Image: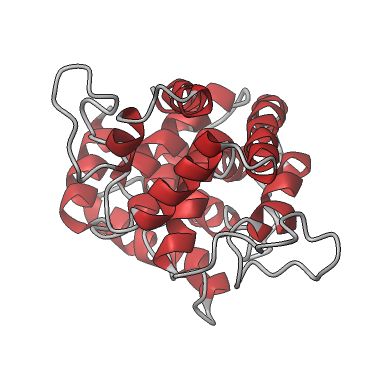
Amino acid sequence: MKWEREFENYLTLHGHKTDAAHDLAHFRRVYKTGLKIAEEGADVEVLIAAAYFHDLVSLPKNHPERHLSSLLAAQAAEKILTAMGFPTEKLKPVFHAIHAHSFSAKVEPQTVEAKIVQDADRIEALGALGILRCLYTGGKLKRTPYHPTDLFGKKRPLNDELYTIDHFFIKLFKLKDLFQTKKGRALAALRTEFLQEFVEKLAADEAGAHRILRVITDGHQKSFFHSLDPFAKNRKLENEYIVDELLADNKDLFISKFLAQLKDEIL
């Protein structure tokens, strides 16, 4: 598609360079997932534009105006798309889909495209990919991975500004009940099960789960994986990729399971 090429070229030059959780690969996955869960009647041009530009502005999670990110992204995307000659009549639906995708913006999606983009973006927060993105962000914000004596928050208030794993309980485990599309809900349920298994293995003090947590949290200055060969089938392992470090440890059963789940999610 013409627009896919144009958006890829633009974001290669102007996209996020230091945030692996909101890079070009993330935009591509949101678009592809959107196509998988799309309901009848969805406008593919609106869908691709909203998917590629939904995180054009993404303020850090600890920023006081974080809730404005999707509005700022929608405003920036509208200017860029206008300059590209994108169909004028589709700018408003794209604006709404971008604005409504964010959890923190609290904007209810009103169109089929907005519902699809919101679901496709939320899928990224679940499964092995969700673990990767959440722990990476926690490391970037220098948060403690988890409470040392009460991981599940049974005897204390949950606080994901202090403990990364608390975010699973505050938000991630609840996401599956907020999906808008039938296919999105089914996919979210499966990926939530993997999140739960990961937390249970952490609580059981299993070495593989703790190794995954340490590698990702400490790797917040790295890229997630090689863009062309993410699982190093035809290249040597490289220190600049988080997944490569896990591949070096994949004799552990849970690390192998994590990598297999991640492969299923991104390929």
Q: Is residue 91 visible?
A: no
Answer left or right for 77 relative to 15.
Answer: right
In front: 20, or 71? Answer: 20
Q: Which residue lies furthest to the right in this view?
A: 155
Q: Determine the image quadrant of residue 57.
A: bottom left
In front: 19, or 74? Answer: 19
Q: Can residue 244 be seen in this view?
A: yes
- Residue drawn where x is 67% and y is 33% of the image: 197
In front: 261, or 80? Answer: 261
Q: Residue furthest bottom?
A: 64
Count of numbered marks: 0
Image quarter of the C terminus: top left
- Residue drawn where x is 57% and y is 71% of the image: 67
User: Residue 171 location in percent, x, y?
Assistant: 70, 55
User: Residue 192 location in percent, x, y?
Assistant: 68, 35
In front: 223, or 103? Answer: 223
Answer left or right for 205 relative to 261.
Answer: right
User: Residue 193 location in percent, x, y?
Assistant: 70, 31
- Residue drawn where x is 56% and y is 30% of the image: 42
* Colour convention: secondary structure
- Residue drawn where x is 51% and y is 22% of the image: 253
Image quarter of the N terminus: top left
Q: Residue furthest top?
A: 233
User: Residue 35 location in percent, x, y?
Assistant: 49, 26
